[in-house]
Image (tube, helix red, strand yellow):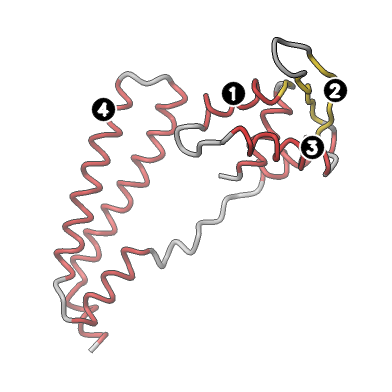
Amino acid sequence: MDTSLAFLGLVEAQPGHGYELKQRYDEYFGDAKPLAFGQVYKTLARLARDGLIEMAGMEDGSGPSRKHYRGLPDGRKRVIEWLMTPDAEENASRTNLYAKVVIALLLGEDATRILNAQRSALLDTMRTLTRAKQSAPLLDVLAHDQALLRTEADLRWIDLAEARLNDVKETLS
């Protein structure tokens, strides 16, 4: 997730001061990618410097004055570009698990044990996600569903890799 663009999207959706924006960020994304207060203010400063948001005023409170930020047309344009750009997987065809299987085969180790250990961990993850969905708010259910489907895909790959281990081992010899 691009933290800066997600944060910019929050400013575009509803202007506010740093503390309010961090609360909204934490509500929607904090479980997956926590954001420290220092990072909030650095991000706001960078977005303002780049002409994507502006300070729209100051609010007095019990502590220091709070800067109120709002989006600018270039900011909205940048968020829309980000929204419409498909995410590229990070070299998804060569994962860490793939590398472990290849190296295990090259070393004459039991790649099935590696696949079984990963399968077990993924099944535990699926159980945890399924339990978490049962009492979760709808936004969390949506996030858990994506994680579950990715986990299912990894499990299918493990099954396929296991079925091909002997053939792959021969190609490496």
Query: Disc 1 designates what residue?
Result: 24
Q: Nearer the viewer, residue 82 or 30?
A: 30
Residue 9, position as x, y percentages in the image: 68, 33
Q: Cα distance, mark 2 to mark 4?
A: 43 Å
Residue 1, position as x, y percentages in the image: 55, 44
Q: Amino acid at mark 2?
A: Ala
The disc placed on residue 75 is 3
Badges 1 and 3: C-beta atoms under 8 Å apart? no
Identify the mark nearer the N-term, 2 or 4.
2
Q: Cα distance, mark 1 to mark 3?
A: 18 Å
- Left or right of 165, for residue 97: right
The kind of secondary structure element at disc 3 is helix
Q: Residues within 10 Å of mark 1 (few under 14, many from 20)?
A: some
Q: Amino acid at mark 3?
A: Gly
Q: Cα distance, mark 1 to mark 4?
A: 25 Å
Residue 15, position as x, y percentages in the image: 74, 22
Q: Is residue 28 above or below residue 81?
A: above
Query: Disc 2 designates what residue?
Result: 56
> Which residue is at 25% across, 47% downward?
122
Residue at the outermost front position: 63
Q: Cα distance, mark 2 to mark 1?
A: 19 Å
The disc placed on residue 68 is none
> Which residue is at 72% across, 20% downward?
16
Query: Disc 4 designates what residue?
Result: 131
Identify the mark nearer the N-term, 1 or 3.
1
> Which residue is at 77% across, 38% downward?
45
Q: Cα distance, mark 3 to mark 2?
A: 14 Å
Identify the mark nearer the N-term, 1 or 4.
1
